[in-house]
Image: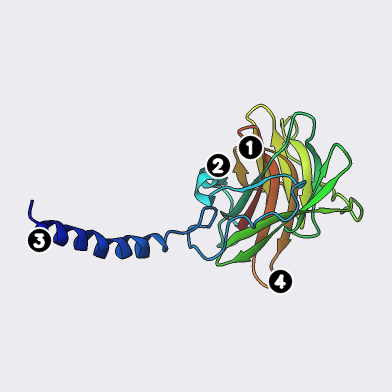
Amino acid sequence: MSKVTVLRMSMAVLSAAPAVAAHAQFVPPAGYSGNGVKPGVAAPTDPDVPTLTRIPDTTLSPLFHVDPDYKRGSSTGHVKVVGAFEIAETQKRHVVSAWSPGFLPVTLSFNDGQCYSLQADYTGGTLSNGRVRKVGCGHRQTDEEAPSSPPPGSPLKFVGSAWGYGAWADERDRTTLVTAPYTKTFQPLFTVEMLTSAIMAMNGPDFPGGNVTLVGRVGGRLTVITLEVGY
């Protein structure tokens, strides 16, 4: 091989290197959401808080099903996953209860007496920048009564209610049914293929909808899922 050929090959490699580097810098850092605007989970500042993992919305969307018979005037039901987080537990340390003044932040109470607050940013129609911090366990929201009751003989067990929504667990099918708010009768709005232990919510002031957060287990792992709901 001549010196001229070697020189040309070397120049080609050198000219390609900046192009490769320029392309690599546009690869989003690990943990960023699909739109690349904010990380799914913020960098933790306290090593002692439970590990938080952002679950893609599309992974859990197939678990939710609007009741096909639901009607409210001309409106039908609507449910969409806008954020989901997995919270790490251990064999000796697990969540025993959860509550919220709205749909976020969610206070998680562990069996060792410690409480942590899960918060996230709600921008662009999805949750991002999820973070957990240690908080006191006081100021727990009072559980609401069941807004309505299922038909006699139903296997459903009451989980909780918030802003008129009722959550009912079917342990046989390992599903949870959520009823519509502001109704005098038992009206299923949607079901989810998971058993839940808590429900939180907040409705919009001038439209038939809001956000609902469910705490439960998906594949045996503690998961907090926030939904956009229309009724």
Furthest toward the top, the residue is: 172
The answer to the question of whether label 1 and label 3 lie on touching residues, with beta carbons closer than 8 A, is no
Return the residue at label 1.
194
User: Of 145 and 81, which appears nearest the observer?
Assistant: 81
The answer to the question of whether label 4 and label 3 lie on touching residues, with beta carbons closer than 8 A, is no
Q: Secondary structure at mark 3?
A: helix
Q: Earlier in the sequence, mark 4 or mark 3?
A: 3
Residue type beneath disc 2: Leu
Q: Is residue 231 above or below residue 148?
A: below
Q: Nearer the viewer, mark 1 or mark 4?
A: 1
Residue type beneath disc 4: Pro
Furthest toward the front, the residue is: 3
Residue 167 percent location from the top left of the image: 72, 44
Return the residue at label 4.
205
Residue drawn at 7 percent across, 55 percent down: 2
Residue type beneath disc 1: Met
The answer to the question of whether label 2 and label 3 lie on touching residues, with beta carbons closer than 8 A, is no
Residue 60 percent location from the top left of the image: 55, 45
Furthest toward the left, the residue is: 2
Q: Is residue 63 above or below residue 81?
A: above
Return the residue at label 3.
4
Query: Disc 2 versus disc 3: distance between alpha carbons?
Result: 64 Å
Query: Disc 1 versus disc 2: distance between alpha carbons?
Result: 8 Å
Q: Is residue 144 visible?
A: yes
